[in-house]
Image (cartoon, rainbow, N blue to C red):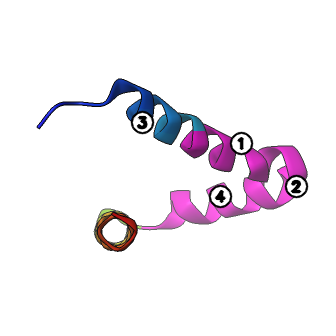
Amino acid sequence: MRLNWSELCAGLAIAFIIEGMMPFLNPPALRRLLQRLVALDDRELRLGGLFSMVGGLAMLYLVR
């Protein structure tokens, strides 16, 4: 399987666009969200990361 650099770069670009939307559109809400995230313990953060990765893999599988 060959790595397609243009698709990888396009995917990263889309991720950067999505990540930048919240601080651009509503900075105070992002600050409140980040304060809540800091209050979570390690187990809760890991579970959130796991669900995010599994959801991303499922979405990737469905669109591919």
Q: Provide the residue span drawn in magenta.
A: 14-40
- Binning the other alpha carbons within 10 Å of mark 4 as few (below 14), some (14 to 19) or many (20 upward) gives few
Left or right of 5, for residue 16 = right
- Which secondary structure class fits the magenta region best? helix
Q: Are marks 3 and 4 in contact (CB under 8 Å)?
A: no
Place residue 17 in its image quadrant.
Answer: top right
- Amino acid tagged 2: Asn
Question: Is 39 or 17 nearer to us in this picture?
Answer: 17
Mark 3 lies on residue:
7
Residue at left 40%, top 67%?
63
Cα–Cα gap, marks 3 and 1: 20 Å
Is residue 35 shown in magenta? Answer: yes
Q: Are marks 1 and 4 in contact (CB under 8 Å)?
A: no
Left or right of 4, for residue 23 = right
Quadrant housing the C terminus = bottom left
Cα–Cα gap, marks 2 and 4: 15 Å
- Binning the other alpha carbons within 10 Å of mark 3 as few (below 14), some (14 to 19) or many (20 upward) gives few
Number of the front mark, 3 or 4:
3
Q: Earlier in the sequence, mark 2 or mark 4?
A: 2
Q: Earlier in the sequence, mark 3 or mark 4?
A: 3
Residue at left 49%, top 36%?
12
Place residue 30 in its image quadrant.
Answer: bottom right
Quadrant housing the N terminus = top left
The circle drawn on residue 26 is 2
Mark 1 lies on residue:
20
Residue at left 79%, top 46%?
23
Mark 4 lies on residue:
35
